[in-house]
Amino acid sequence: MTLYLACWTRPSWGTLNYMVPFIVSAREQHGVTSAEDYLAKHAAFLDKKAKTGARFAVHDSAVEVTAWVGFNEWLVQCECGAGNATDPAWGLACCYGCGAIHRLVTFPDDPAAIERALVARVKPSDRHWLPTESVDDLLAQNADASPGVLVGVSNVLE
Ligand SMILES: [Zn+2]
């Protein structure tokens, strides 16, 4: 009987605090500390990948890409379709799929303001921003959010 009761007793999900007070960037995604470190780690990864026979081409991409935040991470969309981690301080994104190196990355004028508005959302899975949205848009989404409802996710999934 005790075991049965234990199965039905669980913590309240409403009291969880995820404690991720930042937006993930290439720093966390690839374990690098600088743009130079990111380029070196990208090159080392692709050296190993080449030994598997995988096809890719290391190249400086001529395509301008715009950074956005999806599920708590700064990203760009590579021309190959992959999402590549970036960092507002570096203006760089490397594709571990096709080998592209993106140096023409556009960020919002005040990425820290975007991050502050998003970090106000407890769940990292609710933190999304598209370049078409202002900080005021994010704050309005925060104010309108209902408990348990993903905030801003429809913008990412459309
Ligand atoms: Zn790519």
Image (spheres, grey):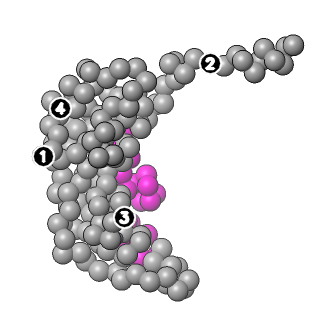
Within 8 Å of ligand 1, the CB of disc 3? Answer: yes
Q: According to the image, label 2 marks what residue?
A: 11
Q: Amino acid at mark 2?
A: Pro
User: Measured from the top left, where is residue 12 in percent x and y?
Assistant: 57, 17
Labels 2 and 4 touching (C-beta < 8 A): no
Distance from label 3 to label 2 (Cα)?
37 Å
Total of numbered circles in the picture? Answer: 4
Q: According to the image, label 3 marks what residue?
A: 82
* Circle nearer the N terminus (3, 2): 2
Q: According to the image, label 1 marks what residue?
A: 109
Q: Residue furthest right?
A: 1
Distance from label 4 to label 3 (Cα)?
27 Å
Report the residue at 75% width, 21% height from top: 7
- Up/down of 135 relative to 143, above or below: below
> Badge 2 local density, few (<14 within 10 Å), some, or many (20+)?
few
User: Measured from the top left, where is residue 125 in percent x and y?
Assistant: 41, 38
* Circle nearer the N terminus (4, 1): 1
Q: Amino acid at mark 4?
A: Asp
Report the residue at 48% width, 25% height from top: 17
User: Measured from the top left, where is residue 91 in percent x and y?
Assistant: 23, 60
Q: Nearer the viewer, mark 4 or mark 1?
A: 4
Q: According to the image, label 4 marks what residue?
A: 137
Q: Is residue 97 left or right of residue 118?
A: right
Q: Which residues are magenta?
A: 22-44
* Circle nearer the N terminus (2, 1): 2
